C-alpha cells in the first residue's frame, strides 16, 4: 500500500487538536490507515503518516472531512535498523 506524509497547518492547541483527531479517527474510510502524527505546536505544523490507495484518494478523504492540508507527499520508508529501503 502506498505511504504518504500529509502536512497540515492547524492553529489548534494540543487539547483542541486531540479532540479533533479523536473525533476524526472513527471516520477513516476503509482501505486507509492513519499510522502516526508528528506535531509542532510552535509553528502550527503537523505531519501525518498515512497508507492509502493513492494521493488522489487521500485528498478526497481530507476534503470530505473538511480537513485542510498544505501538501501530500508519497514517500518510501528507509529502515535505519536494517539499512534497507522498503519496496
Image (spheres, rainbow, N blue to C red):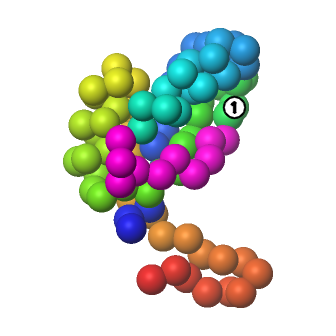
Q: What percent of the width, then of the height, locates residue 57?
A: 25, 47
Q: Is residue 10 above or below residue 39?
A: above
The answer to whether residue 8 of the structure is visible from this angle is no
Q: What percent of the width, then of the height, locates residue 3?
A: 44, 61
Q: Residue furthest right?
A: 81
The answer to whether residue 79 of the structure is visible from this angle is yes
Most common SS among magenta residues:
strand
In the image, what residue occupies the spot 72% across and 14% down? 15
Q: Is residue 35 magenta?
A: yes
Q: Which quadrant of the figure contains the N terminus?
A: bottom left
Q: Is residue 9 above or below residue 85?
A: above
Q: Is residue 87 above or below residue 62?
A: below
In-image side of 5 versus 55 (left or right): right
Q: Quadrant of residue 80?
A: bottom right
User: In front: 10, or 20?
Assistant: 20
Q: Quadrant of residue 74?
A: bottom left
In the image, what residue occupies the spot 52% across and 80% down? 86
Per the image, label 1 sits on a secondary structure element best described as strand
Q: Is residue 57 above or below residue 84?
A: above
Task: Provide the residue span drawn in magenta.
Answer: 29-38
Q: What percent of the width, then of the height, locates residue 72?
A: 38, 46
In the image, what residue occupies the spot 62% across and 47% down? 36
User: In front: 32, or 86?
Assistant: 32
Residue that badge 1 annotates: 40
Number of labels in the image equals: 1
Q: Quadrant of residue 62?
A: top left
Q: Is residue 49 magenta?
A: no
Q: Which quadrant of the figure contains the C terminus?
A: bottom left
Amino acid at each position: 500500500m502506498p505511504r504518504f506524509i500529509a502536512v497540515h497547518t492547524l492553529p489548534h492547541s494540543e487539547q483542541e487538536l486531540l479532540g479533533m483527531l479523536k473525533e476524526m479517527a472513527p471516520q477513516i474510510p476503509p482501505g486507509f490507515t492513519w499510522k502516526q502524527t508528528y506535531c509542532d505546536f510552535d509553528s502550527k505544523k503537523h505531519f501525518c503518516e498515512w497508507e492509502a490507495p493513492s494521493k488522489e484518494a487521500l485528498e478526497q478523504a481530507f476534503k470530505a472531512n473538511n480537513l485542510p492540508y498544505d501538501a501530500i507527499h508519497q514517500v518510501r520508508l528507509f529502515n535505519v535498523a536494517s539499512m534497507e529501503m522498503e519496496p
